[in-house]
Amino acid sequence: MNHQLSGDIIYLNVGGTRFATSRQTLTWVPDSFFTSMLSGRISSLRDETGAIFIDRDPKLFSYILNFMRTKDIDLRELDVSVLRHEAEFYGITPLVKRLILCEDLHQSSCGNVLFHGYLPMAAVPPPEATPLGSSLGPTMERRPDPQPRPPFLVEGLCSNALSGAADARPGSVLRVLPEPASRSHSRAPSLEVRPPPPAPSSAVPQLSRSSSDLRGPNSARGHSRASSLDLRHHSRNSSTDLNRRFRDDGSWLSSAGPHHPAWPDTLRVCIVKGHHNWIAVSYVHFVTCYRLKDSTGWQLAFRSPYLEPVIERIALNAKVVTTAGAQPESGTKMLAVAYGTQVRLWGISEEGARSEIGMFQLSVPVDSLFFIGSQLVALSHLGKVGVWHAMTQHWQIQDVVPITSFDTAGSCILLLGCNNGSIYYIDMQKFPLRMKDNDLLVTELYKDPSLDPITAISVYLTPKTSLCGNWIEIAYGTSSGSVRVIVQHPETVGHGPQLFQTFTVHRSPVTKVVLSEKYLISVCSEYNHVRTWSVTRFRGMISTQPGSTPLASFKVVSLEDLEPCPGYPAANDCGPYGEQDDEQVFIQKVVPETDQLYVRYASSGKRICIIKSVDGTTMTSFCIHECEGSNRMGSRPRRYIFTGHSSGAIQMWDLTTALDLASKGEPAFVAGG
């Protein structure tokens, strides 16, 4: 054999490509893969010619071998991180050190051209003093099971998919294995109740306008990258996974006693919300608010007291319309938080002074919390709607059909998609109570022809009309995978909306649907599979000539912890985000523990940019928000991505610049700015 004729010549077969080099070249770096291989400390295989076989990438090996020969390397067309990984495998310490230095130079701690700012974590407030007999007392107690889990989750929709486990978020991973092994890797079904400590109130379901899922609150923490063909670990298509909105009610796992969070990183950012030039940042036990001013930038404007319960939902209203009946102490801004079945509302003055507006009880877990105009709305998938009316200062609760989706239109209309196949609406602008029976005015707008649960809904108001006007366009998705568009014509005002189009391209429940000026976008629970159509309009109205045209099909895969922190789905929703007359985007967070996000066009799925944490900390939440322009001439509103981090800090990114660069074909993620 040739390798036996000369001890100084070494023949290698790396991934099918043959190389010849000298022993001196391979062994000048001590304690490397090659010194161990040639000394016999690790076993080796030989091919038919007698060359030592190494099952690695031959292209990367050629660069490493060239460095071993010349002690120099050209990185102009190389991925530094990939080459570093390969150099670490071979144990080439001098090359690894150089590549680490290159990575440090490549990524600036000041971010790239998209990085806009950094807000450090505010100081943790002291615990709130609660006098004896105060109404704050009940918030310290664990709520009992208000009622059994809703039967509509398991009747007809989930007979073929429960299998004793609750489903994960669309695109996430489910472990269903026989016996429990440890806390980190549980083999128990995700619905199995583990012994104390009891599950925190964060196990309650989340109701958002974008998507939902069913998840067992005591599932194993962590994610899996197993193949989707491994049916033991994945749930590709579960009929119970209608959307993230009506996850299984975790209150049945609760027991009497105080809240004991199971997550040690209590200083991480849980939720970020924006409204006008304000943002609200929620941590596990308190909330802070920042406001933007032209001259000083973002400044801390408010800090809530320390709350014992784990905060699960927040809502911010930075532009309260003052009315004659409003209480003066309510302030000019309003902040609401929800934990368990309770909602707490504060008023915030321009100086940051806090006033307690009230604490309200919904009696069932709060899945979604938001403002419509000056009205605060709390929803539960169990069929409860709570409304605090700013004019009357009155908290009203209404029982409705179990809710599976919702959307808002303008500043006065709330649309509810329900599990009986009907779409209901509540007009917040009109007096919200019937004088006869003190009920909210809840009106049935439309009923699905197949009576399938309405799992996603989107309203589009044409520029010339409003929901109270002559033309209404509503797109909705169902648990069977259908996407329908209904239209209220001027000629049919008295007869309700009419079915306009139906698409049956999804085989899984639709979790999101968005009807915009140019596109119809739908997402199903099959790993966030997205379908988009271009919409034809005539004078602003949707038209059948030539009709909607298929545009794109792609997936926004996003794995999720099987034991997520409170509010994780609401704070890490992939979207789409953006106004209906503007470019909409998806935010893709591939794995839970990551320091980067991918921004993609909602219409085509093409990547716009990569957002990477400037300090390497994990991104625990994010929010897209458009801030108003300054008073200076020529300024315009700009869109930003606010990312919350495990360190408690907020990082800001300029999405408007990213979209501008992407439209010009320029890279938006130039290293070092």
Image (tube, rainbow, N blue to C red):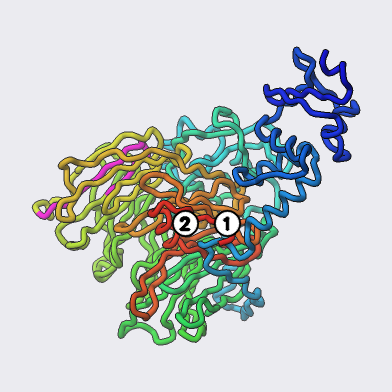
Residue type at the position of mark 2:
Asp
The residue carrying pointer 1 sits among few (fewer than 14), some (14 to 19) or many (20 or more) residues within 10 Å by Cα, namely: few
Task: Give the residue displayed 75% in from the left and 12% down from the top.
Answer: 48
Residue type at the position of mark 1:
Ala
The vertical placement of 328 against 503, above or below, is below
The answer to if 514 sits in the magenta stretch is: no
The vertical placement of 1 against 146, above or below, is above
Foreground residue, 40 or 515? Answer: 40
The vertical placement of 259 against 589, above or below, is below
Q: Position of residue 68 (x, y in %)?
A: 78, 38
Disc 2 versus disc 1: distance between alpha carbons? Answer: 40 Å
Query: Is any atom of residue 206 visible in this view?
Result: yes
Indicate which disc residue 153 carries.
none
Classify residue 441 by image quadrant.
Answer: bottom left
Magenta region: which residues? 475-490
**Rendered-image quadrant of the N terminus:** top right
Query: Is any atom of residue 246 visible in this view?
Result: no
Q: Position of residue 337 (x, y in %)?
A: 50, 68
Foreground residue, 39 or 608? Answer: 39
Q: Is residue 157 left or right of residue 182?
A: left
Q: In what element is the residue under mark 2?
A: loop
Q: Which residue is mark 1?
A: 671
Q: Position of residue 211 (x, y in %)?
A: 43, 49
Classify residue 282 by image quadrant.
Answer: bottom right
Q: Which residue is mark 2?
A: 367
Task: Give the residue displayed 65% in from the left and 75% down from the top.
Answer: 123
Mark 2 in CB contact with mark 1 (< 8 angstroms) = no
Classify residue 106 by image quadrant.
Answer: bottom right
Task: Give the residue displayed 26% in from the left and 71% down from the top.
Answer: 431
Foreground residue, 285 or 665? Answer: 665
Question: Secondary structure of the magenta portion, mostly?
Answer: strand
The mark nearer the N terminus, 2 or 1, is 2
